[in-house]
Amino acid sequence: MQSFLESIEWIQTALTNSAKNVGAPNQLIPWSWTASQLCTLASQFPTGLTQTIILSEIESQWLHVFKNNVSKYQGVPNTTSHSSDSLVSQSSIFHLKIERVKSLQTACQNATVLVLGNLSEQGVGGTADPIMETDGKKIHKFTIDLILHSKFKFLFDTDRFGQDWIQNALSTVRFTSALITKRTPSIHPRFLPTEHLIFVLSESKSSFTQQLFSNRLKDATFQTCASTIYSFLLTITSISPPITTTTQTTLNQTCKTTTRRIQLLEVSTGKVVDLVLRDADTKLADLVEVNDILGIHNPYVHEGLRRLEEEVVDGGPGGSNTLRELEYGLWTVLFCIPATSANSPGEAFKDVVPVDENGYHDFKMYPSRFKVKDIQPNQKNISLLGTIVHLTSNMPIQKGGKKSDRFGIRLMDGDDGTHTDITLWDEVGLANRQLQIGQIVFIQNLSTNLIVGGGGGGGGGGGGGGGGGKTNKCYVVGNAELGTKLFCLSTSVGFLTSPILRNFTSLEKAVLLVAGFYCRAKIVSWRVLESGHLTEYIHPICGKPLETKNEVLYCRFCSIFPHSRGTHAFQFIVQIQDAGSRSRIGQAQPIDVAVQGRVADEVLGVSAPEFNAMDNQGRLQVLETLCGREFDFSVSVYRDKRGDNALRRRVDAVCQING
């Protein structure tokens, strides 16, 4: 498992560097997405993966996923053309760097102008504007002027914020709905003022940020008129799509209103509030992303935005006015601190996880490994890596007059020994019936549901017994609707054959391990199990033994009477020793490992039904070839709960060493 974790880490680092090269500095790479991509690659390349293949394939996938965000913003428009009547569309979105601030004297007032350049050094248009480098040499960057709307003028009050706040706190701007002036012989095209602009701040702990955003949601009082200016610093947890509603006026005219909501979280208190954008202002939602920190200066806070909530006051019931939403107004100014601008990589993202409309915390884009100890109610898209320590047979129930299958897995986190029960429903459970105790698995896109009334299974949650899925007062659930996928690392030949993804352990050290390991070893002897049989009769779908029930074959694990007949499968023990070693005094003793099913077929080079069809001479010839052969083994370690609770080892994947 450690080699798998290390692989995820260096892949994330490489993808982060690639994201920088395409204009997305410090882009967070989801841990779960990276892990699933690596598992998928390993299944596609059973002969082994190299670092070059891994990075090439996964980087290609990531750029495909990320390209929409990369190309979302435009750079400095090409204003060198004389035909500049329609240089940009009002729907264009720009993200440009503030090179400097200057003043422009107009007929009415002294306007503030931002000189804007591309985020990268390369430009395609604009004005060739000389900029001084630190060594005194002049270089030329393509820039364009933006005349600021009057609502932003207060920000450039040097008496209030000081001379250097722009250089220290303000880095870029994002804006839309921008018109550009026509070229004239004396005036180069420039952007006219737009209200739909957001200032991007470099960090949340600058003196400017702490000075401007001093309010908390509890400070807000409802006003009939805007007599107090509030400024909040909140984290975006979700952004709704535009919703258009139609109403009839008193004059029987149709009136359409478009609304978007940005759901915000005050991290220090856990309070949630919506910022409501209406009509043309809904374009502002396109300038921010989930997990960005949003600074809101001077929003509407009025009586219509209250919500009466019941709560206990002094031991008895009472009521309080709770702020339900904020409204974006004519003089509201927005600021943005991107999630990746936190003081450490991923800090903002780790502290805040998006919350959907149903109140579920969504971990789909979480950049770190989610562990068993992190499980809480109302989470979705969580992914777990661990060792199977218990399996529960199918416990089907009737849901809506239809049979639903449910299988249980108890998964243990190898880091701290914590475990959780997971219920896999219907298709997901049926597709993973071959799992065995001791195997290391990665399960993607699980959900947690709060236990109501402390009941057992049923509903959309879990079930009773070992497979109920109860952890931290919640059920852990996986099904097709959630997009749940399970990858078994222990049975993956692609991991076993890829030196960059696995580390071999000597048997002298392996004998002390209580978790799975890889080794290169040779078979020195073999023996049958205590039953005395070299094969057993199994259900081919799940690999578990069949039994007879009312004189009919029955699979207890699947809880079904199979339509087809069972099949014979090998089960025997081999003793293995480190490959290339010779018997000597002080050398670690060979260890016993179980070999069964498909793996046994590969080791022997013949299937169990073919073996049973041979005469005694043919069987002996097959068995005699076992000893002395060297293989790469993926070995799972588990405790036999049905027996003496002793530590057992089983080969789950094998690859013969050539030569």
Image: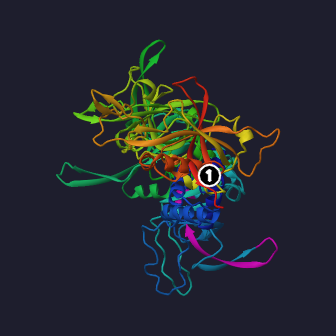
Quarter of the figure with residue 567? top left
Q: Position of residue 529 (x, y in %)?
A: 54, 33
Q: Quadrant of the C terminus?
A: bottom right
Between residues 458 and 496, which one lies in front from this camera angle?
A: 496
Q: Position of residue 592 (x, y in %)?
A: 63, 37
**In x, y percent, where is residue 625?**
59, 51
Residue 115 appears in the rendering: yes
Q: How many marks?
A: 1
Quarter occupied by residue 130: bottom right
Which quadrant of the figure contains the N terminus? top right
Q: Is residue 227 visible?
A: no
Q: Amino acid at mark 1?
A: Ile
Q: Is residue 532 above or below residue 313?
A: below
In magenta stretch: residue 150:
yes
User: In the rendered image, which residue does mark 1 sit on?
Assistant: 8
Q: Residues within 10 Å of mark 1 (few under 14, many from 20)?
A: many
Residue 441, position as x, y percentages in the image: 53, 42
The range drawn in magenta is 133-152
Task: Specify whether 341 is left or right of 536.
Answer: right
